[in-house]
Amino acid sequence: MPQSTQPATGNGSARAPLQMLACAPAESLAKRVASHMNLDLVPAKETWFACGEGKFEIGANVRGSDLYIFQNVIAPGDARSTYDRFVMLLHAVEAASLADAQYVTAVVPYFPGARQDKRKDRVREGISAGLFARCLQDAGAKRVIALEIHNEAIGGMFNPAQCRLENLYLYGSIAPWLKRRGLAGDVVASPDVGGAERARHYAETLSSRLAVLSKVRDYSTANRVVNSTLIGEVNGSDVLLVDDIVDTAGSVVAAVEELKSHGAKDITVACAHPVMSAPAWERLGKLSARAAAEGWKFNVVGTSSIEHPDAPAYYHSFDAAELLSRVIRGVNTRGSVTRAQHDR
């Protein structure tokens, strides 16, 4: 396979020849990352049998390589489940390990089970994030690269002697992108107290004010927010509402309604992972229609960790391919992953 001719950005020479391959749902993202690095993807093939089993075949020599395997575990339009796609990733990681790749890294922008990182006072349930971490390291992954993982503590669920988690932060790349497109606003808001630190990073990068919504959830019902309260001032200001995940958009609707009730003007919602489970698009569409009727602007920004090719006009996608390419180059050349996240 061709090797990158770009100069190393790290502290030394490549630790091993750099190669990349992709599971089918992540092929588009992987190709864009590879193009930033003047690489071709290693040919690979997924096979699904009638009984539902699958297998993964690598079509070229990867022995001794520093190999990066891409997978999108949530893929709109793909009939297979998140669990199917995760198991296919395990097949790919094991195939690479058995093919004697020197380093195997799973690139999983949306880490599955990240919201199931603790029991929440329920002792008779599993901790899925830890289960998935053990599966990846036991399959042969030496490193996992994720984007804005829901809880940083998940890194402690990996055995560092076997596998390490690289949790990438978006604000250094996406905040300037939002500003260039007039979507940064005057105030950066978090939809909950848990996301306040994320919002603070955006606010500092954009030199904006900070506001936080304190929301109350009903944990007896999945994805249900009872109410939220604003901490901060948004009256007469355009607001950038930042979160890591938009799933059914219930939190987004509650947050936007709270911000509007306090006099916010235009609102942009920016998230790392636009999961958009039903009824998310319906809810967001109603907000967009309300904005048009009332004369204010409503936009939603998500990253290419989950791709929506048929998204409505108010939705904008930030391509994480360049960020991922910088980080992969940094890992391959033993460079600083932190610096790679902020170099542009």
Image (spheres, grey):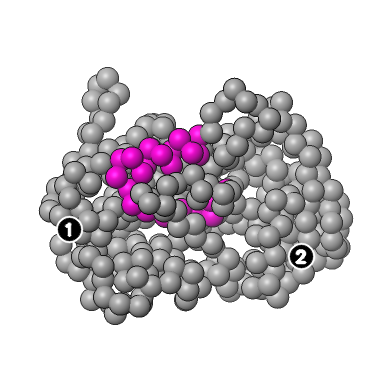
Query: Of 217 and 298, which appears nearest the observer?
Result: 217
- Residue sitting nearer the eye, 79 or 39: 39
Residue 247 is situated, as x and y percent measured from the top left of the image, at 59, 41
Quarter of image, res 269: bottom right
Residue 305 percent location from the top left of the image? 46, 52
* Kind of residue at disc 1: Gly
Residue at 15% from the left image edge and 62% from the top image edge = 1
| Residue 177 lies within the magenta run | no
Q: Is residue 125 left or right of residue 105?
A: right
Image x and y of residue 112, in percent: 48, 40
Q: Position of residue 128 (x, y in %)?
A: 50, 34
Q: Which mark is in front, 2 or 1?
A: 1
Q: Which mark is residue 64?
A: 1
**What residue appears at the point 30 percent right and 40 percent down from the top-left corner?**
139
Q: Residue furthest top?
A: 51
Question: Callout 2, which amino acid?
Answer: Leu
Q: Residues within 10 Å of mark 1 (few under 14, many from 20)?
A: some
In this orientation, does residue 105 appear? yes
Mark 2 to mark 1 CA distance (whole Å): 48 Å
Res. 300 image quadrant: bottom right
Within-10-Å neighbours for mark 2: few <14, some 14–19, many 20+: many
Left or right: 65, with 229 as reference point: left
Placement of 71 over or under 102, stated as above or below: above
Q: Is residue 132 magenta?
A: yes
For the question of whether residue 256 can be seen, the reply is no
Residue that numbered label 2 is attached to: 210
Q: Residue at x 53, y 33 (%)?
A: 127
Stretch in magenta: 128-150
Tag 2, which secondary structure? strand
Name the N-terminal-most of marks 2 and 1: 1
**Secondary structure of the residue carrying numbered label 1:** loop
Q: Is residue 184 left or right of residue 308?
A: right
